[in-house]
Amino acid sequence: MARRSDALVGPNPDLSPGRPDHHHRDIHGGTARAAVFGVSDGLVSNVSLILGVAGAQSTGGIVRLAGLAGLISGAVSMAAGEYVSMQAQRELLERELDVERRALARRPHVEQVELAHIYEARGVAPDVARELASHMMRDPDLALETHAREELGIDPNALGSPRGAAIWSFLAFALGALIPLLPWLFFDGGGATLTSVVLGAVAAVSVGVLLARFTDRPRWRSGVRQVLIAMVAAGVTYAVGSVVGVSV
């Protein structure tokens, strides 16, 4: 008769776990997402704004003022929006966890049976499923974490940091928005406009490559996509500015 440990391990108990040959990035916290997309949003929005104002034949001072206003207002808006959205999501998840916590306290047997049924639905043998569920229910914290993962698909210890996401979003947007503004801090005219275009294109490629590293997609495709997005947006605003013009 096979020992219980053999039954749980499987048909080949000689295989011992070694070091994992791969690892996963933490994509649930929100800070990495806020940083990457903050840079992209800051770059696209401010290069569009700067070139739109420059296309209206504005003076260098007006372009600088518009670029700085776009940088500050955009960074604040991004940070506030990221904080509010992540805080709302966190509060919603915490509410669901409270519901599950109360259910575990009031009817632990029902929750244990429910967990066993989940394991059975995934192909675990009924007796093994019941034993696993019984083991998970012995520790209240482990029981809550297990039910949260299996029923809600969330990790109670990784709900995200609204404050961290807001800070990273603010800094990243400001960095992206600063890049096309840099030339206008030192000179103006056609040279500053051309330099903004070149810096924007280089930064867009860099953002695309960074996104490709996160997603393991072809770098050239991601880079070209980011450049096209930035250049189309900037081209439209530049054309609108050239048509509308400005009176000084």
Image (cartoon, rainbow, N blue to C red):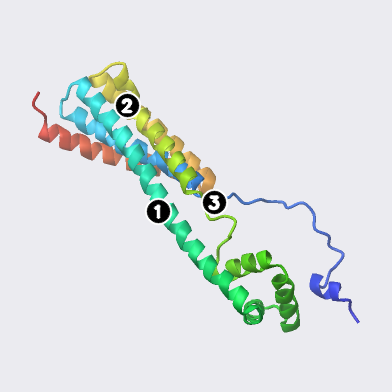
The single residue placed furthest to the left in the displayed view is 247
Lower position in the chain sequence, tag 3 or tag 1: 3
Q: CA distance from mark 3 to mark 1?
A: 16 Å
Please tell me the numbered disc located at residue 85.
1
User: Secondary structure beneath disc 1?
Assistant: helix
CB atoms at circles 2 and 3 under 8 Å apart? no
Characterize the local packing of mark 3: few (<14), some (14-19) or many (20 or more) Cα atoms within 10 angstroms: few
In this view, the residue farthest toward the right is 1
Measure the C-alpha gap from mark 2 to mark 3.
Answer: 31 Å
Image location (x, y in percent) of residue 169:
42, 41
Element on which disc 2 rests:
helix
Classed neighbour count for the residue bearing mark 2: other residues with Cα under 10 Å, few (<14), some (14–19), many (≥20): many
Q: Nearer the viewer, residue 178 or 95?
A: 95
Residue underneath mark 3: 27
Quadrant assignment, res 183: top left
Q: Quadrant of the N terminus?
A: bottom right
Towards the viewer: 191 or 38: 38
Circle 3: residue type: Ile
Residue beneath label 2, please?
A: 181
Establish if 174 lies above or below 156.
above
Residue at 53%, 67% in the rendered image: 98
Image coordinates for residue 100, horizontal then vertical, percent: 56, 71
- Amino acid bearing label 1: Ser
* Percent position of residue 128, x then y: 75, 78
Residue at image coords 32%, 38%: 74
Q: CA distance from mark 2 to mark 1?
A: 29 Å
Q: Amino acid at mark 2?
A: Leu
Residue 220 visible somewhere in the drawing: no
Q: Nearer the viewer, residue 92 or 199?
A: 92
Q: Nearer the viewer, residue 142 or 149?
A: 142
Quarter in which the C terminus is drawn: top left
